[in-house]
Image (cartoon, helix red, strand yellow):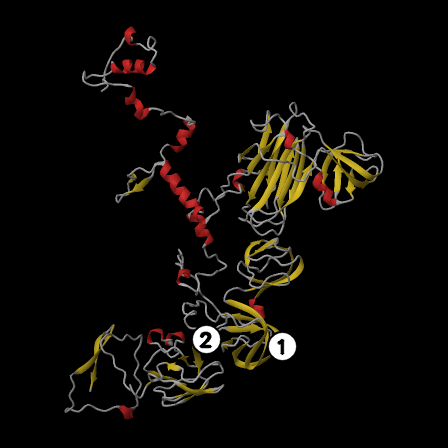
């Protein structure tokens, strides 16, 4: 054990560090003099607990930034105290990984870099490099690279090149402009527009070499020339030398327009230009090229590839060598570094297990535009819905074409791309359904860039300008084409899949609040009220309620269960019921369920407008009431819950004037409990009033509690 207090004026020569070849033994000799117990030792191994402890890259300023940042909680007395056990920064980093992913939230790891020797560079080939790379890494940081020696230590000399590949993931929707400034040669490729998924095909947008020749025209005195083919601007860069008859020496490119092929020069033409123009650069001569992308969708992966290289024929050891990548994001006025966190290697872990809690939460969130929750096919589709606010399910059934049409406008589509260019997005909402040429059925709006783009959940099937109609998605079921004659709606395009009874149909000439009843047919439904709508009418089907419960959809199928709706009042004791034409496929012997039917009641016959049962009804049915018929007779699979009754207060019987007690149960009896009235008014006529005589007796009273006290009603 080390002494607490000791004094030394020096170290004994026989125990110092200089006369021993074993430095560890020398240290032991020194430490041994610090013990205060003759039976104890103090040797090198006793220092293992603190060995290798040292400060690394932690300046005084850095320490001040984290000082006092311990986790504290407030106790019951309102005093802040340190959280026990201590929460370390490692704890917080681990938690952050769980929360955000690894690192996932705007946390790319940079593009993968593959390095090649000079003898693997072939400037005039499409791929530029040949053979296997001599080294691979993914160091990117801000996309600024400057080489004072070799590109990588494994290189033979200062020449050679590097190829970067991976994904670019934008954080905002819109067009992005990529800038490349380099003193060497370069190429830049981006995912071909319309490519769907995976490591896809690239389209080359920039290729600046030592020398390229293109035909162009220009007029003497002007400071610009026009390329015969505008696409050749892909092969030129600002700062590149331009040579041709009529162009002064030492002229370079000041700017260029990819759309028109116009190239602005640093000097005016001394003569007309017509024919070949040479565009060249030397290694060490700085040039800049740029490309503005098509509209990119936020958070989607896009393939990207860039190359930096020096040809074999050039000795680059004594020249400046660098390449700088920058980007202009949508809505920004100035460029910024193309940082690594927007770039991802092809082997980056995009699996759900690496997402983290927050990205998973975002993926499953229901936004203000609405969305789907769970499903009706299997129990694994059931999900929990959590909200910090109430769920808004206020819903008013739609009434007309004008009421459901949010916008009609012209847009430009591109095949296999889900971004549509628009000049006016007024009225369009996230979630709206989109209809028009080149747009697949079931397409909805996922995002909106005001007066610029709309992002869809499906890609366009063709390119071109088209008229688009945006339809309210709240309650929307499907769109079809058909006609209505009387109470029969016949579809000429589409089918009745996903349609359910009690939905409403909307279209030009269709009455407001026209309801439907499914019949089991794939092309016909029954409507109410009766009306006439011409052939070829576009019909939109909507839910009639805001909260739809499809939990029984797989259980209550039309082939096994039908909800029958009465069309006229039916008295108790009836065996023939007038019903709507919505029971196609009904077979004699099906069971009938409902409070108005005796147990074991079955169908004996049916027509298009009536059903005959084998046992008289035990209660009346009002017009518009519904009941269940089914061919499933197993008690455990009883289907009466498939068609909930509209008369929800048995043993009352429905009449045209309201509910009344049945013949079987003529009295209303309250067996315990309290009946509370906002007001109690009894209206009687003198003929119904009987005076109480002295011989009348009663021991029953009904207490009526009022603000003025308790009053009793005497019961005879």
* Horizontal relation, residue 176 to residue 365: left or right: right
Residue 606 percent coordinates (x, y): 46, 87
Residue 611 seen in render: no
* Horizontal relation, residue 609 to residue 416: left or right: left
Q: Nearer the viewer, residue 193 or 331?
A: 193
Q: Is residue 336 above or below residue 369?
A: above
Q: Which mark is residue 577?
A: none
**Whole-number angstrom distance, CA of label 1 to CA of label 2:** 27 Å
- Name, please, the residue furthest toward the front: 131
Q: Identify the residue position indicated by label 1 in the image.
A: 535
- Name, please, the residue furthest toward the bottom: 687
* Horizontal relation, residue 243 to residue 205: left or right: right
Residue 272 percent coordinates (x, y): 85, 38
Quarter of the image that includes the C terminus: bottom left
Quarter of the image that includes the N terminus: top left
Q: Residue at x 51, y 42 (%)?
A: 347
- Name, please, the residue furthest toward the top: 13
* Horizontal relation, residue 469 to residue 233: left or right: left
Q: Nearer the viewer, residue 175 or 402?
A: 175
Residue 23 seen in render: yes
In the figure, residue 659 lies in which quadrant? bottom left
In the figure, residue 712 lies in which quadrant? bottom left
Q: Residue at x 58, y 64 (%)?
A: 441
* Mark closest to the chain's N terminus, 1 or 2: 1
Q: Identify the residue position indicated by label 2 in the image.
A: 558
Q: Residue at x 44, y 78 (%)?
A: 562
Which SS class for mark 2? loop
């Amino acid at each position: 054990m080390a002494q607490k207090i000791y004094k030394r004026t020096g170290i004994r020569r026989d125990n110092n560090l200089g006369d021993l070849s074993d430095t560890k033994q020398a240290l032991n000799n020194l430490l041994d003099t610090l013990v205060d117990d003759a039976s104890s030792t103090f040797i090198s191994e006793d220092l293992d607990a603190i060995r290798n402890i040292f400060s690394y890259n932690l300046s005084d300023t850095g320490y001040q930034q984290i000082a006092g940042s311990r986790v504290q909680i407030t106790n019951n007395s309102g005093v802040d105290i340190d959280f026990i056990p201590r929460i370390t920064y490692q704890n917080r980093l681990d938690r952050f990984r769980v929360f955000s992913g690894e690192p996932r939230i705007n946390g790319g790891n940079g593009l993968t870099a593959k390095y090649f020797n000079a003898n693997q560079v072939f400037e005039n080939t499409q791929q530029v490099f040949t053979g296997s790379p001599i080294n691979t890494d993914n160091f990117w940081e801000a996309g600024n690279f400057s080489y004072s020696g070799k590109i990588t230590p494994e290189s033979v000399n200062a020449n050679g090149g590097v190829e970067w590949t991976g994904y670019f993931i934008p954080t905002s929707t819109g067009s992005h402009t990529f800038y490349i400034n380099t003193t060497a040669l370069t190429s830049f490729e981006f995912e071909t527009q319309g490519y769907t998924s995976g490591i896809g095909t690239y389209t080359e947008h920039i290729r600046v070499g030592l020398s390229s020749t293109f035909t162009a025209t220009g007029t003497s005195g002007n400071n610009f020339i026009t390329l015969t083919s505008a696409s050749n601007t892909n092969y030129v860069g600002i700062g590149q030398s331009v040579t041709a008859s009529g162009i002064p020496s030492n002229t370079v490119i000041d700017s260029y327009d990819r759309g028109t092929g116009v190239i602005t020069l640093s000097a005016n033409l001394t003569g007309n230009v017509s024919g070949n123009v040479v565009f060249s650069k030397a290694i060490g001569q700085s040039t800049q090229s740029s490309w503005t992308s098509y509209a990119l969708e936020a958070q989607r992966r896009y393939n990207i590839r860039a190359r930096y290289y020096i040809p074999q024929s050039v000795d680059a050891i004594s020249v400046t060598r660098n390449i700088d990548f920058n980007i202009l994001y949508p809505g920004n006025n100035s460029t910024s570094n193309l940082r690594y966190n927007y770039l991802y290697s092809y082997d980056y872990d995009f699996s759900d297990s690496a997402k983290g809690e927050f990205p998973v939460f975002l993926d499953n969130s229901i936004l203000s535009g609405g969305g789907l929750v769970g499903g009706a096919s299997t129990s694994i589709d059931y999900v929990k819905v959590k909200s910090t606010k109430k769920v808004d399910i206020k819903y008013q059934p739609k009434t007309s074409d004008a009421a459901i049409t949010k916008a009609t406008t012209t847009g430009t589509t591109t095949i296999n791309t889900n971004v549509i260019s628009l000049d006016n997005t007024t009225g369009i909402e996230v979630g709206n359904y989109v209809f028009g040429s080149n747009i697949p059925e079931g397409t909805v709006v996922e995002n909106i860039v005001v007066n610029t783009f709309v992002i869809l959940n499906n890609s366009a099937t063709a390119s071109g300008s088209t008229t688009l109609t945006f339809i309210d998605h709240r309650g929307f079921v499907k769109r079809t084409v058909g006609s209505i004659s009387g109470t029969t709606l016949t579809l000429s395009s589409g089918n009745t899949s996903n349609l359910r009874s009690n939905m409403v149909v909307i279209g030009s000439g269709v009455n407001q609040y026209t309801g439907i009843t499914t019949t089991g047919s794939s092309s016909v439904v029954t409507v109410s009220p009766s009306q006439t709508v011409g052939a070829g009418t576009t019909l939109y089907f909507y839910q009639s309620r805001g909260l739809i419960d499809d939990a029984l959809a797989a259980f209550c199928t039309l082939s096994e269960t039908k909800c029958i709706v009465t069309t006229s009042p039916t008295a108790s004791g009836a065996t023939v019921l007038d019903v709507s034409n919505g029971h196609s496929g009904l077979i004699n012997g099906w069971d009938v369920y409902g409070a108005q039917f005796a147990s074991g009641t079955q169908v004996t016959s049916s027509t298009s407008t009536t059903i005959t049962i084998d046992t008289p009804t035990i209660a009346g049915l009002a017009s518009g009431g519904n009941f269940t018929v089914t061919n499933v007779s197993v008690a455990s699979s009883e289907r009466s819950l498939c068609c909930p009754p509209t008369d929800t207060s048995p043993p009352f019987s429905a009449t045209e004037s309201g509910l009344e007690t049945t013949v079987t149960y003529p009295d209303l009896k309250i067996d315990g409990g309290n009946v509370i009235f906002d007001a109690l008014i009894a209206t009687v006529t003198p003929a119904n009033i009987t005076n109480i005589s002295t011989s009348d007796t009663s021991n029953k009273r009904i207490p009526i509690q009022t603000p003025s006290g308790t009053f009793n009603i005497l019961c005879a």
